[in-house]
Image: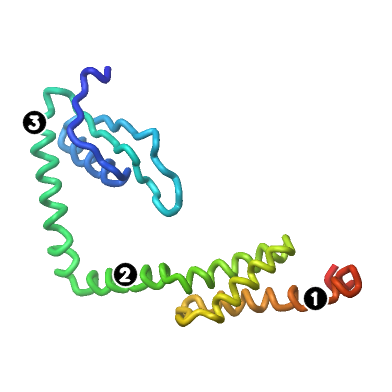
Amino acid sequence: MSEMRVTVTTFFDATSADVAREFLEERGIETFLMDDPGLTTEAALPGLAINGIRLQVAPWDVDQAYLLLNRLKREQEDSPTSTAFADPSLAAELAEDAREEAEDNRPVNRLADRALKAAIIGVILWPVQFYASYLLVQLIDSKEAVGQRYRWRARLAALINLPAILCLPLFFVYGKLPSFIG
């Protein structure tokens, strides 16, 4: 059956491949996506195909598929400027989303988020509190200010972490945790 298919183009992310497939199928061309066995599932690179995802069509649809894919490419190149900035509210929303994404990707904010997660996990797995303490010290030493949306995470991590770290000397002195802890 694969001998009856011709690869029209190759994509390196699953989203673009799906968009092209749907575009062709809406116009009556039967398509086949040959997935890459090396498709990643990592959070940093979701849907990234190492060797590519091949979009294939029947031999008699090749010319029409090339024409339609070129049209899709031109539409995608023209579309961001014409639609995003024609509507001021959409442009403002996109700008706000870009600012939030930039804030989310700042290392100091990711550090605050990680400190909170470590402190919460450290309530159950006590040694993780040391890692949470380390992250909090890195936050204190950081030259950057923690973003407004992430300050509560850093404060809550410190609030969770402080009693656990203060009880540590009691553990070493008495060989056990105080009875009010467990």
How many residues crowd around disc 3 within 10 Å: few (fewer than 14), some, or many (20 or more)?
A: few
Instruction: Classify 70 as above or below 31.
Output: below
Residue for point 82% across, 76% down = 169
Give the residue pinned by disc 3: 63
Disc 2 residue crowd, few under 14, some 14–19, many 20+, Cα 10 Å: few
Q: Are marks 3 and 1 in contact (CB under 8 Å)?
A: no
Amino acid type, callout 3:
Asp
Q: What residue type is labelled 2?
A: Ala
Looking at the rendered structure, which numbered label has been put on residue 167? 1
Residue 55 pos. (x, y %): 24, 34
Depth order, front residue of 23/43: 43
In the rendered image, the quadrant that contains the N terminus is: top left
Q: How crowded is mark 1: few (under 14 residues within 10 Å), some or many (20 or more)?
A: some
Q: In this view, does 31 lie to the left or right of 118?
A: left
Identify the residue position indicated by label 2 in the image.
98
Image coords of residue 9 (percent x, y): 19, 36
Q: Is the C terminus in the top left, top right, bottom left or bottom right quadrant?
A: bottom right
Element type where label 3 sits in the image: helix
